[in-house]
Image (cartoon, rainbow, N blue to C red):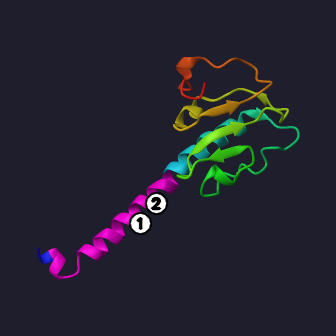
């Protein structure tokens, strides 16, 4: 009870709010890293993925990427981007991905590559 008497509960609650908020950014960075891995494995002659900057806080501001209210990637639409290359296993880190549209890739994705949620 001494914690509440000294006003210790308010700083504790504020600290917890800050930690939870920061964890959302870390999670978004993991998703950004996964998408950046994809970008580095693709040929992008028209520079459509130019906005995919890994130094940004999260990928939700990138073109062709849609996020939910929690800043988690739910959609990646690369259908008409004239890209070629290979998908990467890091896409399995996009835990909330509901829609992935790609075209002109070198090989098909196997379900055991961690993309079962995306397909």
Give the tally of numbered discs: 2
Name the residue furthest bottom. 6
Mark 1 sits on what residue? 18
Q: Tell me, yes or no, whether the highlighted magenta stretch contains residue 21.
A: yes
What kind of element bears circle 2?
helix
Answer left or right for 64 relative to 28.
right
Residue 107, above or below 118: above
**Principal SS element in the magenta part?**
helix
Q: In this picture, which residue range is highlighted in magenta?
A: 3-26
Answer left or right for 35 relative to 24.
right
Residue 109, above or below 46: above
**Cα gap from disc 2 to disc 1, whole angstroms:** 6 Å
- Residue at (56%, 52%) from the top-left corner? 69
Tell me where residue 85 appears, x and y as whole percent.
76, 27
Mark 2 sits on what residue? 22
Name the residue furthest left. 1
Tell me where residue 74 appears, x and y as whole percent.
60, 40
Q: Quadrant of the C terminus?
A: top right
- Residue at (76%, 51%) from the top-left corner? 51
Circle 2 Cα neighbour tier, 10 Å, few/some/many (<14 / 14–19 / ≥20): few
């Amino acid at each position: 009870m001494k914690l509440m008497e000294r006003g210790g509960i308010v700083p504790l609650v504020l600290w917890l709010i800050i930690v939870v908020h920061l964890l959302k950014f870390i999670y978004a960075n993991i998703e950004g890293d996964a998408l950046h891995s994809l970008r580095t494995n693709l040929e992008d002659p028209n520079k459509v993925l130019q906005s995919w900057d890994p130094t940004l806080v999260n990928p939700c501001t990138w073109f062709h990427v849609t996020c939910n209210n929690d800043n988690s990637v739910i959609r990646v639409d690369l259908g008409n981007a004239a890209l070629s290359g290979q998908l990467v296993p890091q896409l399995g880190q996009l835990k909330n991905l509901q829609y992935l549209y790609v075209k002109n890739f070198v090989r098909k994705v196997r379900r055991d590559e961690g993309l079962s949620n995306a397909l």
